Image (cartoon, grey):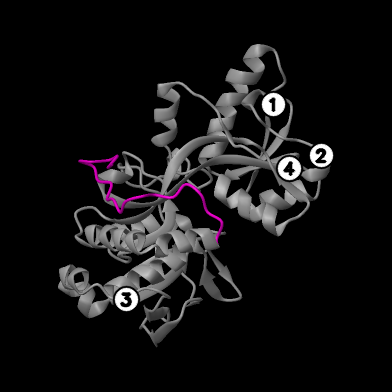
Amino acid sequence: MPITKARRSAGAAQARRAAPRSMRPVAAAAAVALAMGIAACSSSGSSTSATTGSSATSTTSSSGTAAVVATYPGVTEDTALHNSTPAKYRTNGVQVAVFNDWPPDEFLQNGQLTGWSVDLAHAMAAVLNLKFTYNPTSFDAILPGIQNGRFDAGFASFGVTPQRLQVLSFIPEDSEGEGYAALKSSNINITALNQLCGRSVAVLTGAFDYEYLLGESKTVCTSAGKPGITLRQYTTQTAADLAVISGRVQLTAAGSVDLGYLVKQQPKMALSTLVVNSVYNCIGVRKGDPLGTVLADSLQQLINDGVYQQIMTKWGVAGLVTKGLLATQANPDPK
């Protein structure tokens, strides 16, 4: 089925790009620590130990997390890239934070970290011949953890925002938009935003999608004399999806890739045609850290070798990037 992308004004598109990635949890204003707008670490931000799903040589760090030098099919070390890596990372390895509940990007399955973003991390580690220590954790703990030095990189499909670029830099991994899914039996296929009027939609608590759809409910629905969109917030995406599967809510809104994965796992669900608000999903690193350039170069090597494309095809991910790039405050939209 062809994908329809809603056409929006330049101002609306900029507002979307300035907001966190679709369906990424973002704290309300009172909970956003730091003047720069980085999500504050909450009580849910503790890490848990897990192993990774790739072929790897494992050791145990003092924190109990899995430290591995990964091997990945078709990947060999790039000696020049290894040598260009800062000495502290060649010696001590890289502390990698991974969002633990966002399939198919990155998630825990039977105690193992898996997902297309995790596979990319393993492949990058193999290109660089570096030890990556994986720390599965909640999303809201990752950005401040990178900033304060607890983590060196975050594989969590981050969106690029002007606020985050004040303290972090980002390596785009792919791009996706916001999609919608409903029970097949409902015969609901959203092709335009005004078709959401009068319907109930499940969203993740604190996500951009709530504010976006709240605004669209006024602009597209109530201002035109139509009933508004009924938004139901849930603390996890799984709970939001189950609300639809159980018939309590008509639709769920999330990243288009994530919902594509959902409908493969849940035959009762169907993906709507409409996709809006395309943005990059990125790896995050500290602003000014040479590790960012190294990771971007390693991604370029994986693209050149075709390994990147193989990983994304394996997970059914579209919206592929064609270059290994680094988004910085000075160059927020690299080409």
Mark 1 and mark 3: Cα distance apart in space: 50 Å
In the rendered structure, find residue 39 and report the number of the disc placed on it. Answer: none
Mark 2 and mark 1: Cα distance apart in space: 14 Å
Dot 3: element: loop
The residue that disc 1 covers is: 195
Asked if 314 appears above or below 55 in the picture, the reply is above
Amino acid carrying label 2: it is Ser
Q: Earlier in the sequence, mark 1 or mark 3?
A: 3
Q: Earlier in the sequence, mark 4 or mark 1?
A: 4
Q: Earlier in the sequence, mark 2 or mark 1?
A: 2
Q: Residues within 10 Å of mark 4 (few under 14, many from 20)?
A: many
Q: Residue at x 42, y 70 (%)?
A: 135
Amino acid carrying label 1: it is Gln
Does the residue at mark 4 contact the one at mark 2 (Cβ under 8 Å)? yes
In the rendered structure, find residue 182 and report the number of the disc placed on it. Answer: 4
The answer to which quarter of the image holds residue 324 is bottom left
Mark 4 and mark 1: Cα distance apart in space: 13 Å
Q: Which image quadrant: the C terminus?
A: top left
Dot 4: element: strand
Say whether residue 249 is left or right of residue 62. right
Q: Position of residue 7 (x, y in %)?
A: 51, 24
Q: Residues within 10 Å of mark 2 (few under 14, many from 20)?
A: few
The residue that disc 2 covers is: 186
